[in-house]
Amino acid sequence: MSYKHFLLEKQGHLATITFNRPEKRNPLNAESTLELLDILTSFKDDADTHVIILTGTGAAFCAGADLSIFKGITDPEERLRRFKAQGKTNARLTARIYELLESLEQISIASVNGFAVGGGWTISNSCDFRIAVEEAQFWFPEVDLGVPLGAPAASRVTKLVGPSLAKAMIMTCKRYTARELHSIGLVHKVVSRDQLKAATSEFAQFLLSKKWLALAQAKAIINAASGIRVAEGTAITPELLLTPKE
């Protein structure tokens, strides 16, 4: 199946999802959000895929909310009204994207090729692992735009880094480098741009070399300990967690 905003490639037990609107820095709008949700939902019944890579084309991984709706609008109150309306429309769908990435039995890797902003940063935070290029930058712009960061995004970064650092990230809107996030464990590996594809592929193959069921169970157990539910319809059920099988 082809998509307007994404490329989807499957090879053996590995799937790669690529944001593919480089001219707009791979933003999230109503259409692209629905497409990504459709792609991720399909993995709930996909027993052949064990590892998922998410990456982007061009200079951005995902630039967050699509701000093209502001084109030609100079009045700040009208811009804010439109931003809030778009956020309200997409909030429920993006929350489901974050939840699916966390709870699917497949192991997910964010291969961050550039900017990861707002919802784009939260998508990478919802993956199990993050590999980023040296020049990647991460930030939450919402407070500067006059709106709070949504609860689904705020809760995820808080779980990962703790409340004190989460407040600094969300309330100051600071741009963080890949190296800064690596120093606190939020990014697992930093590489040069020309090494990103190879480094991500190498790590994906390393994961694929593991016993699949044990790997999926380990993810589910860690998620349960962190208060993250297991996706419905997957092979990893609460009963399976209590009675591991070969």
Image (cartoon, rainbow, N blue to C red):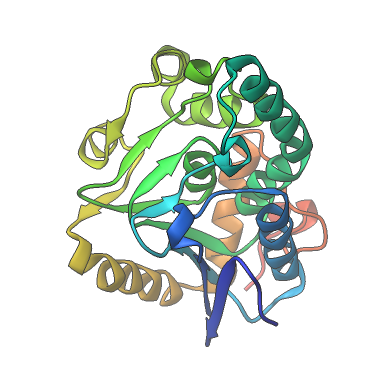
Q: Nearer the viewer, residue 213 or 149?
A: 149
* 140 vs 195: above or below: above
Residue 71 % position (x, y): 56, 39
Residue 168 % position (x, y): 39, 14
Q: Nearer the viewer, residue 85 or 159?
A: 85
* 141 vs 54: above or below: above
In the image, what residue occupies the spot 66% across and 33% down?
Answer: 227
Q: Nearer the viewer, residue 166 or 134?
A: 134
In the image, what residue occupies the spot 57% across and 35% down?
Answer: 72
Horizontal side, residue 10 vs residue 245: left or right: left
Residue 150 % position (x, y): 64, 25
Q: Quadrant of residue 202?
A: bottom left
In the image, what residue occupies the spot 44% across and 61% down?
Answer: 22
Screen quadrant of the N terminus: bottom right
* 103 vs 206: above or below: above
Count of labels shown?
Answer: 0
* 180 vs 96: above or below: above
Residue 208 % position (x, y): 45, 75
Screen quadrant of the C terminus: bottom right
In the image, what residue occupies the spot 55% across and 65% down?
Answer: 214
Q: Nearer the viewer, residue 38 or 145?
A: 145
Q: Quadrant of residue 191?
A: bottom left
Which residue in the rendered view is the most extreme toward the bottom? 12
Q: Quadrant of residue 15?
A: bottom right
Horizontal side, residue 61 vs residue 214: left or right: left
